[in-house]
Image: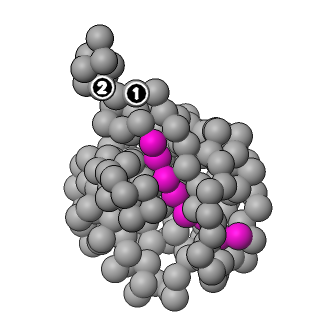
Amino acid sequence: MGAVKVKRLERFSAEILEELVGVYMRGYEGLREYGGEGEGYAKRYLHWCWSKARDGFFVAEAGRELAGFIVCDRDWYSNYEGRTVGAIHEFVIDRKFQGRGIGHILMEKGLDYLSHYTDRVELWVGEKNTGAIEFYESYGFRRVGQSGIWIRMVKDLHAKPDKLQDEG
């Protein structure tokens, strides 16, 4: 594996979409109930992610290959919180790159990005996706609810810089 580079996705083309869908489908192998209903669903969902959170759409490249991505929304209105929070809409590592630290690099990038805009991040993870749950818990996410097969997790970040100034 070559050096891992994380960067903001700059453009969203048909070619890039195909690469993202491939990573998405391979990342959810064995967990299909959480990865949607096939490639058509994945394409629609990733289009939505791009339209909602393009500034927080980061990809990891290992050499010349797309290894994974994270989609971070800095202004998500959470019905559960009753306010705007950060959200991780998608986080997936291609199965062939899992276990190599790429997820940690992407998560650090995503949390750093969100920390500039919000004091709380939420995400949803499948209840049987124990590896992901443990990964999120290692970053300080905690379980706060469940809806069907999905567990809602949140992480508190430091206060936003503008909040610190208001309190001073």
In the structure shown, which secondary structural element does the residue marked by tag 2 occupy? Answer: helix
Please give the label number shown on residue 82. none
- Is residue 93 part of the magenta span, yes or no? no
Check disc 2 and give the amino acid type. Lys
Question: For residue 32, which quarter of the picture?
Answer: bottom right
Number of marks in the rendered image = 2
In the structure shown, which secondary structural element does the residue marked by tag 1 occupy? Answer: loop
Q: Nearer the viewer, residue 168 or 22?
A: 168
Q: Position of residue 76 (x, y in %)?
A: 33, 56
Q: Residue at x 29, y 71 (%)?
A: 47
Report the residue marked by disc 1. Answer: 159
Question: For residue 49, which quarter of the picture?
Answer: bottom left
Q: Quadrant of the C terminus?
A: top left
Q: Residue at x 26, y 47 (%)?
A: 55
Q: Callout 1: few (<14), some (14-19), or many (20+) C-alpha neighbours within 10 Å? A: some
Q: Position of residue 21 (x, y in %)?
A: 45, 72
Q: In the image, which residues are magenta?
A: 120-127
Please give the label number shown on residue 163. 2
Q: Nearer the viewer, residue 61 or 88?
A: 88
Q: Residue at x 63, y 69 (%)?
A: 146
**Mark 1 and 2 residues: CB-CB less than 8 Å, in contact?**
yes
The majority secondary structure of the magenta stretch comes to strand
